[in-house]
Image (tube, grey):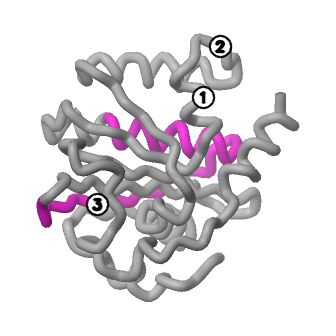
């Protein structure tokens, strides 16, 4: 199971050159589809030697300049896939708090999409799946899509910035933080 998770994680992290990827302006960011009401791009950042796991998401209403983004860190998760799952659950809870029930969640982690979209037993994630299923009840039509990593650059930057913070961090705003602006182009 660990080998499969590791291989799938590596495949999900492949970078594809995309001229529409994040360039510092959230209003230029790629939208999944014009007909979607809101798209919430999510990412979890994990490194074995880091103190924290980073989580980041940004939500964009199609055809609008309305953008909300958040980043947070917590004690390091058990694995990269755990970090991705925790980021999804946190984003879902935030969407519930904001009363956004018509949301498409977008992630570059294909294994996460598979995990929450199938009835397979993921014993290492049983607690997370219980929490996910509780959160999912708020959304009348839960939707999650796999996207290219190049289309998830802003959520990735938010998550990595939170992960590398030397202390606890919670960021909530509609404009990119200074540390995100500095990290554009940084691939660490």
- Which residue position is annotated with label 3? 69
Nearest to viewer (mark 3 / mark 2): 2
Q: Earlier in the sequence, mark 1 or mark 2?
A: 1
Looking at the rendering, in which quadrant would you find the N terminus? top right
Q: Residues within 10 Å of mark 3 (few under 14, many from 20)?
A: many
- Which residue position is annotated with label 1? 114
Q: What kind of element bears circle 1?
A: helix
Examine the image and state in which quarter residue 31 appears: bottom left
* Cβ atoms under marks 1 and 2 closer than 8 Å: yes
Give the residues in magenta. 64-92
Rendered residue at 36%/82% (across/down): 24
Above or below, 84 against 54 in this view is above
Q: CA distance from mark 1 to mark 2?
A: 9 Å
Examine the image and state in which quarter residue 178 appears: bottom left
Which percent across, then down, holds residue 130? 48, 16
Q: CA distance from mark 3 to mark 2?
A: 32 Å
Q: Earlier in the sequence, mark 3 or mark 2?
A: 3
Q: How many marks?
A: 3
Rendered residue at 22%/59% (across/down): 68
On screen, residue 97 versus residue 154, left or right, reads left
Q: Which mark is residue 120?
A: 2
Which percent across, then down, holds residue 52? 58, 58
Rendered residue at 23%/50% (across/down): 34
Q: CA distance from mark 1 to mark 3?
A: 25 Å
Which percent across, then down, holds residue 98? 15, 41
């Amino acid at each position: 199971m660990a080998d499969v998770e590791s291989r799938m994680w590596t495949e999900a992290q492949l970078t594809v050159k995309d001229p529409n990827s994040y360039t510092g302006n959230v209003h230029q960011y790629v939208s999944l589809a014009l007909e979607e009401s809101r798209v919430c791009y999510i990412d979890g950042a994990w490194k074995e030697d880091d103190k924290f796991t980073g989580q980041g998401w940004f939500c964009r209403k199609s055809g609008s300049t309305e953008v909300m983004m958040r980043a947070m860190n917590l004690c390091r998760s058990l694995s990269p896939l755990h970090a991705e799952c925790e980021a999804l659950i946190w984003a879902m809870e935030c969407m519930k708090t904001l009363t956004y029930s018509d949301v498409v969640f977008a992630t570059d982690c294909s294994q996460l999409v598979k995990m929450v979209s199938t009835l397979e037993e993921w014993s290492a994630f049983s607690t997370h799946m219980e929490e996910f299923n509780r959160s999912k009840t708020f959304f009348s039509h839960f939707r999650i899509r796999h996207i290219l990593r190049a289309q998830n650059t802003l959520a990735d930057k938010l998550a990595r910035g939170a992960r590398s913070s030397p202390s606890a961090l919670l960021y909530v705003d509609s404009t990119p933080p200074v540390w995100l602006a500095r990290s554009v182009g940084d691939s660490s």
